[in-house]
Image (tube, rainbow, N blue to C red):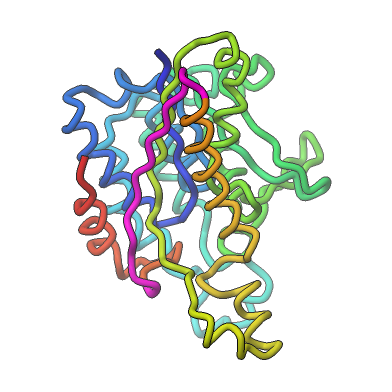
């Protein structure tokens, strides 16, 4: 039996994820490392997955979010330099990489090859618009620093800016900005050969909160062009493609688990108010913790 932990993106909403995982560890009565065999993460989920794959306790991860979240998502530009908002990212990526590197070093891990369990994260190649996946068991990546790879996965263009790989001449963007913010389907296909050979797998996805996007007929039927464009591109902080991709990932995995006897799928998430459904909600950290604690196992 192999168990795979899937960790979606969502910025500081990852506090909901880590809170659920703290309680899930208590529920199963063993460390997450003993329960799970591998980790797949996108964006903030890549940060979580890398620490867990390095052997870090989930409480360490929870503390990283709670203690550093407000500072990370404090804008790096002041009212004295408003023009910088149009030239540079809103937030300083070093405020993420610093605490992550400190956590990894405390675990004796610096490079991808030193991770104790398999870890996979993704990023968009901005040159080709393809999603690239970085696997810790890839021998060509064993000497790469973990933070350099994870950085690629949370490079949300407006928030932290792209990651420029001068060595390989590639520019990376956050894979969560596309259709792969939920890594469950990539995790399934990564293990497809073993699944088709009959090996038993359980996939667990812990979300970052969700807000209902359902509208009523009376409202939508009267939308003008501005309403339609707003709904397609900006409503709920998502594009239509990302909303559909999230639904598709969960629906598809449920269908797979129903039709393949050797695959099981478990999905844990919680509905949150629309105002809290933002990746940089630094004023909502305690509320994220409270919502995470409301999920029962």
Q: Is residue 212 left or right of residue 170?
A: left
| Magenta-drawn stretch contains 116 | no
| Image quadrant where one finds the N terminus | top left
Q: Quadrant of residue 121?
A: top right
| Magenta-drawn stretch contains 262 | yes
**Most foreground residue, 259 or 158:** 259
**Residue at 53% over, 54% down:** 93
**Residue at 82% over, 48% down:** 127
**Rendering coords of residue 236 (x, y %):** 50, 71
Residue 294 position (above or below residue 170): below
Q: Is residue 107 left or right of residue 193?
A: left
Counting every numbered tag in the picture gives 0
**Residue at 52% over, 87% down:** 218
**Rendering coords of residue 272 (x, y %):** 33, 65
Residue 277 position (above or below residue 201): below
**Residue at 62% over, 88% down:** 223
**Rendering coords of residue 33 (x, y %):** 32, 22
Residue stretch rendered in magenta on the structure: 260-275
| Image quadrant where one finds the C terminus | top left
**Rendering coords of residue 157 (x, y %):** 64, 60
Q: Quadrant of residue 189?
A: top right
Residue 4 position (above or below residue 228): above
Q: Is residue 26 left or right of residue 198?
A: left
Q: Is residue 74 left or right of residue 248?
A: left
**Most foreground residue, 278 or 257:** 257
């Amino acid at each position: 039996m192999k168990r795979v932990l899937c960790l979606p993106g969502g910025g500081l909403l990852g506090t909901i994820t880590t809170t659920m995982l703290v309680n899930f560890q208590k529920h199963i009565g063993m460390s997450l490392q003993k329960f799970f065999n591998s980790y797949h993460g996108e964006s903030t989920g890549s940060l979580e997955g890398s620490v867990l794959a390095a052997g870090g306790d989930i409480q360490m991860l929870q503390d990283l979010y709670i203690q550093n979240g407000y500072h990370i998502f404090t804008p790096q530009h002041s009212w004295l330099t408003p023009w910088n908002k149009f030239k540079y990212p809103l937030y300083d990526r070093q405020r993420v990489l610093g605490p992550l590197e400190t956590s990894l070093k405390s675990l004796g891990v610096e490079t991808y090859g030193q991770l104790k369990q398999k870890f996979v994260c993704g990023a968009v190649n901005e040159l080709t618009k393809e999603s690239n996946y970085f696997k810790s068991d890839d021998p060509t990546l064993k000497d790469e620093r973990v933070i350099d790879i994870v950085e690629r996965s949370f490079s949300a263009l407006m928030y932290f800016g792209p990651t420029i790989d001068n060595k390989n001449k590639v520019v990376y963007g956050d894979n969560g900005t596309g259709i792969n913010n939920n890594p469950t389907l990539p995790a399934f296909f990564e293990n497809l050969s073993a699944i088709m050979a009959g090996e038993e797998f359980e996939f667990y996805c812990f979300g970052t909160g969700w807000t209902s996007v359902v509208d009523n007929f009376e409202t939508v039927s009267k939308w003008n062009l501005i309403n339609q464009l707003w709904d397609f591109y900006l409503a709920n902080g998502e594009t239509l493609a990302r909303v559909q991709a999230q639904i598709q990932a969960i629906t598809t995995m449920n269908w797979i688990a129903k039709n393949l006897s050797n695959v099981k799928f478990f999905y844990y998430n919680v509905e949150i108010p629309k105002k809290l459904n933002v990746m940089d909600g630094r004023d909502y950290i305690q509320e994220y913790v409270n919502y995470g604690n409301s999920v029962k196992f």
